[in-house]
Amino acid sequence: MAEGVHEHGALAGLQLVHTGAHAGNRQSRMPTVAPSQLASDYEPFTVPKALERSDIARIRADWVRGAERARGAGFDIVYVYGGHSYLPLQFLSPFYNRRTDEYGGSFENRARFFLETIEAVKEAVGDDCALVVRMAVEALGPAGVELDEGLAFVRLADPLVDLWDVTIGSIADWALDSGSSRFFAEGYQLEWTGRMREATQKPVVGVARLTSADRMAEIVSSGVWDLVGAARPSISDPFLPKKIEEGRYGEIRECIGCNVCISKSEVGHHLGCTQNATAGEEYRRGWHPERFEPAANRDRGVLVVGAGPAGMECAVVLGKRGFEAVHLADDAEELGGQMRWVRRLPGLGEWGRIVDWRQGQLDLLRNVEWIPRARLDAAAVRDYGAQIVVVATGSRWATDGLNSATHDPIPGADASLPHVLTPEQLMLDGKRPPGERVLVWDCEGYFAGTGAAEKLALDGHSVDLATSLHVIAPYTDETLEGPQVRQRLHEVGVRQHRGVQLVEVTPGGVRATDEFGEPFELEIDALVLVTQRLSDDALYHELVSDPDALAAEGIEAVYRIGDCVSPRIIAEAVFDGHRLAREIDADDPASTLPYRRERLVLGSLNT
Amino acid sequence: MAEGVHEHGALAGLQLVHTGAHAGNRQSRMPTVAPSQLASDYEPFTVPKALERSDIARIRADWVRGAERARGAGFDIVYVYGGHSYLPLQFLSPFYNRRTDEYGGSFENRARFFLETIEAVKEAVGDDCALVVRMAVEALGPAGVELDEGLAFVRLADPLVDLWDVTIGSIADWALDSGSSRFFAEGYQLEWTGRMREATQKPVVGVARLTSADRMAEIVSSGVWDLVGAARPSISDPFLPKKIEEGRYGEIRECIGCNVCISKSEVGHHLGCTQNATAGEEYRRGWHPERFEPAANRDRGVLVVGAGPAGMECAVVLGKRGFEAVHLADDAEELGGQMRWVRRLPGLGEWGRIVDWRQGQLDLLRNVEWIPRARLDAAAVRDYGAQIVVVATGSRWATDGLNSATHDPIPGADASLPHVLTPEQLMLDGKRPPGERVLVWDCEGYFAGTGAAEKLALDGHSVDLATSLHVIAPYTDETLEGPQVRQRLHEVGVRQHRGVQLVEVTPGGVRATDEFGEPFELEIDALVLVTQRLSDDALYHELVSDPDALAAEGIEAVYRIGDCVSPRIIAEAVFDGHRLAREIDADDPASTLPYRRERLVLGSLNT
């Protein structure tokens, strides 16, 4: 790995971490260890062994051996990781450390383990390697280290450290470190980590959900930090540093801060990104984020119907693959499809970059034309003159209460009535609830239900949010947003109900059951149905049902992509559009090419 | 794999599965597919693509290719898997299938996909391979196939099938298929699957949490089924069939039905078992469940202090390793440690087998002596005459409200007062709540809090269960018990509160905060504190703090195992005791030997 990094002129770094009380150790079956025997606030079921002196010596020796191995393998940078309330901070924090020996009590005693570890690793790596300490200078909660003591530790260890990597928060509320754009503004950590200069003579790198090149440059040029850490923005655009270096600011595909990368990697065990369809596909599908092969069939005219995330991405990639004429058509005035309303939900403004970046790319591609206000039925599509048709007509929320629990509509739930609304009617069509009291019924569990509830509350309605699920918006727990989502709803006055199954919409209210199957009734003036989405696939089916009519007009292929195949998260719609464009000259573009599952054991990527 | 199975005279089977609507496809990023576009009741965020005809043909062809590969690799049995409401049952079930083509509507149409798949696989495997169909004959819920139609399908497909593997339930309530002993009696599935004879001429295998050899024999000899499936009982005792064959019934280590195997494999990604410490350790640690090497130091006398799960297991394994004299001492009258009260919680009776099996083993081991009513302080341990001392003194629940969220006691929470109780006081010491209204405060989230609440309600108390966590008993979701736990508590009248943090115990009640940090007060007569456990490690520390005194009495080593190191699930305490006994003649028995992490790529296990 280190050699591979060096080939590209970069430095290779390795983070050595011990998570202490927060390690479940389910693989190794070793007892969890920590300064004191206090149940983890991150995994409350985990009660650690209080470290004996011999354990402390062993862990320090393990850290040294790890550092020596890293140096031996050619790494240039080795970390002593003190973020996230992991072991070094557990010693430093009175919340975790109740020891009465020389490792507990006074600040000097609590700092001893962290400092000894840094000293030992410094000695182990010698002058061959830089030593970096990641440090959460402010835990922002009960978990412990406050800014004064955080900076005091920085002063204490400063002579030993080559670079400080500074952050805030604790793993028990990981969002404080890796906040989403829905709840955390760009640069939010600077309130605390911007004060590192008070305590250190050494270079500083920080993170703070920084996504814009301008803001990054301002922080470095003003001297607050020396380097900017940008993991998520680099997933969104791996060429971010290069584009800044070369002044190609407009080409930067800026991170939207949705944290789908965290959901996909932590829960789905495959890294992915809403903005960058190639993230996680570099090796297994051979997709380079910036390189596109000319398509063998690029002389064919392509019509993409639907300018949502899938359609936009498909048209952009077709353009980059050298198609001579790509038309991207939509019946709307604007690009974006569902993004036209999603970006207007409270907190989701930055998600608009999904549209804005692609709009910028379309502007640069002379071979791709954007056709607004194009109401194309099957006949119009056939007559259009394209040889390849890509249907990307998206999906719509069910208007009748169709839901995952019963697979049936709900009696009385009919969005053609004035008091029953879908999210699109509310956000895009201007339909208003005909009274103060609104119930949002969410059977999906991501942003649409909670976003609609928050918006209605901010608009002055008295709002109840009921979910058929056993948690409010469980998908937002995967994006580190769950606790913030539920607290925000509470703060704007939304009453939250879990495990609620609607039985019937009655005049003036709903009949339902609660999480235990008991009756639950609510008087309301309006109901918003966030139950399930249905593909807008009528155009596709009408086209493919008459192959002769297609052939008569010279249409060689009709494909469909995105939500009109299956309604998914936006990242998958973008991926689907990208995938088709990458493989549109394969034998059967409708079927995804197999990807590489093998992990190389012998040989190298170059052989 | 197939060859490895054949070497032992067994048949090798392969289950080919398509999960349809329930597949999140987070790795492959392919659209989920199902008969109709209805959101999954198992993963409500997943909305499938409705299968096109070409998709159906592709899936059938995939199944055929998989079956051909299985046959080619030497497998003797290939499955078409129709359990769990996976794809074949999704076609059969009107809950998932709303198609209007020849694959939907009438029973014959809904059966078509399943039947066509069986036919195609049957043709593919020819006479080389047996074809087995796993079939959930009754979904027991809205998910669909009811017994009449389930048996009707069995009749329809019977000529094509070599063996029926029969079960019940749907993956959305997986517990119906893999129920725990807390909620499902041995044999519970027979009410439905015992009727297979009405519909088939072919052999039948079934599952039903069957753990006792007698019950298995009764089912087979009465002709209800021909074979008994026993996955969990075989994890608990891999030699179960061999022991039955050889009539060694008393040696069977019978499964307790705790479903920790499911928690450990599904969530922890490593298989393990409460009863069998060697489960999942066969390859990586080289532990054979029935073979024990004579210990190099077996001439040393060993004293094990504490006869809970860790101490019992350690003593048994030391005995099997040929130690000449092992004494297992406890101040209690009975073996079992914490199991003395845990097995008396509602529904946990079968967990008593943890004690009973080890008691049986101890009875057989002439070199291990059980010493009850032995109150051993450090001086008595030193004087005992053993050369090796193993401290296994367990843990106790905090008596002061010490908890994971604040890491501090709760003012007023003092179990020396009449109205504040720990689980041990309630279950073991005979202390009774001094009034009707009882609050159980659970910061742990497994069986102790919910078990105490259920018991108190059954005893006639008016019970509130408040948890500091955001779900009631989240660990029971890992063991497939969560929905049953919460419903059971509701049925016995326990009021459930989530996200509750106690602030103070006042005369007559508690002051607390709710999940949003708002005030929450409750008037109660008694409080049960299920906050965190603390190791009973005083004896261990007193012993090791005076090495000279140990040496003076000829004591060569003092070890500790189980909860007195770190309070964990019972499976880990048992593992810890087993681990020490397996490695007690290693260079440093206090440290776990490294286990094999490598997966063999070239060569075989035998080289």
Image (tube, coloured by chain):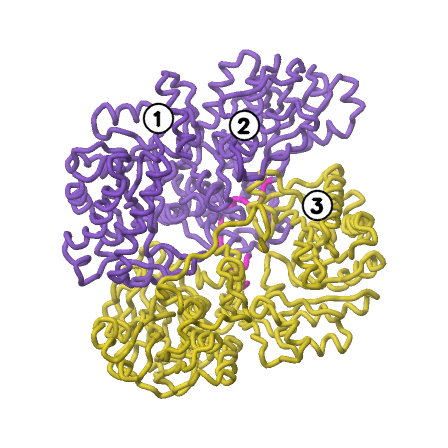
Chain colours: A purple, B yellow
**Which numbered disc, 2 or 1, marks the residue that appears first in the sequence?**
1
Q: CA distance from mark 1 to mark 3?
A: 45 Å
Q: Position of residue A364 (x, y in %)?
A: 49, 14
Q: Chain of mark 1?
A: A
Decide if residue B220 is on the left or right side of residue A167. Answer: right
- In this rendering, does residue B457 appear at all? no
Determine crowd level at label 2: few under 14, some 14-19, many 20+ residues with C-alpha closer than 10 A.
some
Disc 1 is placed on an element classified as loop
The residue pinned by badge 3 equals B35
The residue pinned by badge 1 equals A212
Decide if residue A452 is on the left or right side of residue A415. Answer: left
Q: CA distance from mark 2 to mark 3?
A: 32 Å
User: Which image quadrant is residue A24 in?
Assistant: bottom left
Label 2 in the same subunit as label 1: yes
**Residue shown at 81% from the left, 23% from the top:** A548
Residue segment shown in magenta: A512-533
Determine crowd level at label 1: few under 14, some 14-19, many 20+ residues with C-alpha closer than 10 A.
some
